[in-house]
Image: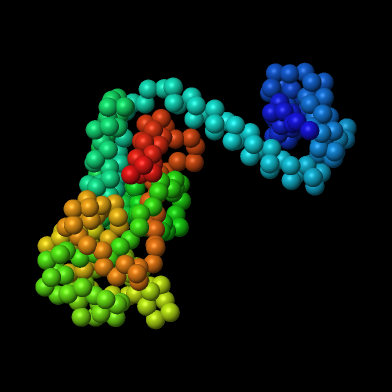
């Protein structure tokens, strides 16, 4: 059984237009051609999709179920065609991107040179904000958000994820000692976040739980501020890998409580007010960013 797109299109157009004659006009085909397409489709499926009377057409129960699948298939094909089309276009225009300061500095900025070389006609506008913004009010095309998304009307595209680790600077560990178990943290200086409060729940096994709520000695609103405080030896902090890769490689920050750390991945999503296919400049930026994150 090989159902053709022509048969699916004939079926859905008949439903949308209300009659075989109207569908034939819309598709610029003959009435007999549409009727034959429907007949072939029903034969291949071994079921009746439409009840035909002299006055109207009605979906059978099987027809209603199949209609949903037919629409999904046609939408997927249309989307695939669109994606191939925009790959041959030369994306151009202004692209306004918003992200939290740490993600902008450590992930987006390092890829800008390569992106501009590949897409020279796109004018990047990079905005940093550690708070959730209104995309329309701020005239933003796409926002990059880290962590679990709140319910909203925004469309979201997952781009990747980063692991969380508890870290300290060698100078701090030399002065205060290295914690050997989670309960030792009560005797240490801990750097946390002003908001959201969930960032002060560290992924550590403790008392039959995979989360440990800290009492911060210092709080900051920005992850980059937390990182700089940690590098300065002001305490221990829990940070995402994208912020600390070079610090860990150079030894400027050292993971602690490794055996007690639960592998928690912090998701990164691109959000935007679009339910229709994205413009070429947004699509190529998200594809480029996702590929860089996967490779890095």
Q: In this view, does 6 lie above or below 68?
A: above
Image point 44% across, 26% down: which residue? 87
Does residue 129 appear to the left or right of 77 in the view shown? left
Please provide percent x and percent y for residue 88: 44, 22
Q: Is residue 137 above or below residue 73?
A: below
Q: Splitting the image into 4 quarters, where does residue 194 fall? A: bottom left
Tell me if I can see residue 238 in this picture: no
Image point 60% across, 35% down: which residue? 75
Image point 21% across, 68% down: which residue? 236
Please provide percent x and percent y for residue 46: 85, 38
What colour scheme was applied to this rendering of the protein?
rainbow
Q: Splitting the image into 4 quarters, where does residue 291 fall? A: top left
Q: In this view, does 249 lie above or below 178?
A: above
Please provide percent x and percent y for residue 106: 24, 47
Labels in figure, total: 0
Image point 34% across, 69% down: which residue? 259
Outermost residue to the right: 54
Q: Splitting the image into 4 quarters, where does residue 264 fall? A: bottom left
Please provide percent x and percent y for residue 173: 16, 70
Quadrant (top left/top right/bottom left/bottom right) for the N terminus: top right
Tell me if I can see residue 174 in this picture: yes
Quadrant (top left/top right/bottom left/bottom right) for the C terminus: top left
Q: Nearer the viewer, residue 166 or 258?
A: 258
Does residue 296 appear to the left or right of 39 in the view shown? left
Does residue 226 appear to the left or right of 29 in the view shown? left
Does residue 53 appear to the left or right of 249 in the view shown? right
């Amino acid at each position: 059984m090989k159902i053709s797109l022509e048969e699916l299109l004939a079926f859905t157009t008949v439903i949308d237009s209300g009659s075989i004659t109207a569908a034939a006009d819309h598709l610029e085909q003959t009435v007999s051609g549409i009727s034959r397409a429907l007949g072939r489709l029903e034969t291949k499926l071994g079921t009746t999709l439409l009840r035909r009377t002299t006055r109207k057409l009605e979906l059978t129960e099987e027809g209603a179920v199949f209609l949903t699948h037919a629409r999904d298939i046609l939408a997927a094909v249309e989307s695939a065609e669109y994606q191939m089309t925009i790959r041959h276009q030369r994306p151009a225009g202004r692209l306004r991107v918003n992200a939290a300061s740490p993600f902008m500095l450590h992930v987006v900025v390092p890829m800008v040179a390569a992106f501009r070389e590949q897409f020279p006609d796109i004018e990047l506008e990079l905005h940093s904000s550690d708070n959730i913004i209104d995309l329309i009010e701020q005239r933003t095309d796409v926002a990059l958000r880290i962590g679990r998304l709140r319910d909203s009307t925004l469309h979201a595209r997952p781009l990747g994820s980063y692991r969380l680790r508890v870290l300290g600077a060698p100078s701090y560990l030399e002065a205060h000692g290295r914690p050997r178990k989670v309960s030792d943290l009560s005797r240490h200086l801990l750097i946390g976040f002003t908001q959201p409060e969930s960032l002060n729940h560290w992924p550590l096994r403790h008392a039959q739980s995979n989360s440990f709520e800290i009492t911060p000695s210092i709080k900051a609103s920005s992850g980059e501020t937390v990182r700089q405080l940690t590098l300065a030896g002001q305490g221990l902090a829990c940070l995402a890998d994208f912020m600390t890769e070079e610090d860990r490689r150079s030894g400027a920050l050292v993971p602690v409580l490794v055996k007690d750390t639960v592998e928690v991945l912090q998701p990164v999503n691109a959000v935007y007010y679009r339910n229709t296919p994205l413009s070429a400049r947004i699509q190529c930026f998200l594809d480029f960013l996702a590929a860089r994150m996967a490779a890095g």
